[in-house]
Amino acid sequence: MNEEFSGRVAVITGAASGIGNAVAHYFAERGARVVGVDLNEAVADAMAAMPGTGHHGIAKDLTAPGAAAEAIDEAVRVAGTVDILVNSAGVALLDKALELSDRMWDATINVNLTASFKMAQAAGRVMTAKGYGRIINLASQASVIGLDQHVAYCASKAGILGMTRVLSLEWAPSGVTVNAVSPTVVETPLGKAAWAGQKGEDMKKLIPAGRFAQPEEVAALIAYLAGENAGMITGENILIDGGYASI
Ligand SMILES: NC(=O)c1ccc[n+]([C@@H]2O[C@H](COP(=O)([O-])OP(=O)(O)OC[C@H]3O[C@@H](n4cnc5c(N)ncnc54)[C@H](O)[C@@H]3O)[C@@H](O)[C@H]2O)c1
């Protein structure tokens, strides 16, 4: 077992599924103690199944009032501190802009943007106080381009970039880096549902690499940004899109 993250505590939202689950596994395999937070109660079993010991699952709706602060408090109580935060909890609720319901707009912004900020704020208080931290926010290629039927999603992910820049400049003097990663379609439950069928096949043809990304590829990029060697990278948005946004 590689011990790159030995002694580090990583809090990962959305850890019951998809990218968050792959990131949790990636960190656990490299010695980190992982605290997974997810709406889905399966997060407890998911953490128990991770390599290594001392992992912890918190079942929580991160859009509930006070939920983010409670999750960070619980992580500190159980694991002692928070060194790394990965904001991966998210939803993709799609419809044409003229048809999109208030409920879909609000739910998207509340999970993708507001909960990510509240987690970063709560974790940032711990990290800035001790002078070390790594925060990585899942944005998306949708943060830098428009996608049909993705108005709330694109807005939430563009918001992630603005938030990332401000947190990075405010917290860099305290040893805390804040970055975003922006994948193209990733083959997770969310990605497969949003890009099912011919729509997905058409999309692949537009990606120079000719395929979608795998959760493990996103996890490897996040782990690089969470590592000791990435201390001078902050406020960035790194695309992992097979060249799609460069066309
Ligand atoms: N899959 C893709 O194609 C893709 C591409 C670019 C960016 N992303 C982003 O990556 C992140 C992870 O996506 P994924 O594909 O792994 O999705 P996923 O659906 O597989 O997992 C998302 C997880 O977030 C959890 N979650 C949702 N709402 C929550 C809430 N209110 N409180 C707590 N947890 C909640 C879900 O229960 C789920 O376990 C999202 O932010 C998504 O926007 C995904």
Image (tube, helix red, strand yellow):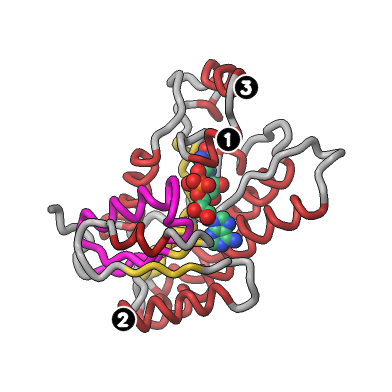
CA–CA distance in space, label 3 to label 2:
46 Å
Q: Which percent across, then down, holds residue 63? A: 63, 66
What residue is shown at x 36% (from left), y 48% (from top)? 22
Q: Which percent across, then down, holds residue 69? A: 53, 78
Left or right: residue 119 compared with residue 30: right
Crowd rating for badge 3 (residues with CA inside 10 Å; few <14, some 14–19, many 20+): few
Q: Which residues are magenta?
A: 8-36
Residue matched to label 1: 193
What residue is shown at x 29% (from left), y 67% (from top)? 55
Residue matched to label 3: 199
CA–CA distance in space, label 1 to label 2:
37 Å
The CB of the residue at mark 1 lies under 8 Å from ligand 1: yes
Question: At numbered mark 2, what does the secondary structure look like: helix, strand or loop?
Answer: loop
Q: Quadrant of residue 227?
A: bottom left
Q: Is residue 33 magenta?
A: yes
Q: Are marks 1 and 2 in contact (CB under 8 Å)?
A: no
Residue type at the position of mark 2: Gly
Query: First in sequence: mark 1 or mark 2?
Result: 2
Classify 37 as above or below 112. below
The CB of the residue at mark 3 lies under 8 Å from ligand 1: no
Classify 36 as above or below 199. below
Residue type at the position of mark 1: Ala
Query: First in sequence: mark 3 or mark 2?
Result: 2
Q: Nearer the viewer, residue 225 or 219?
A: 219
Judge whether residue 182 can be spotted in this image: no
Q: Nearer the viewer, residue 69 or 129?
A: 69
Q: Nearer the viewer, mark 1 or mark 2?
A: 1
What residue is shown at x 62% (from left), y 59% (from top)? 111
What residue is shown at x 27% (from left), y 57% (from top)? 50
Residue matched to label 2: 80
Question: At numbered mark 3, what does the secondary structure look like: helix, strand or loop?
Answer: helix
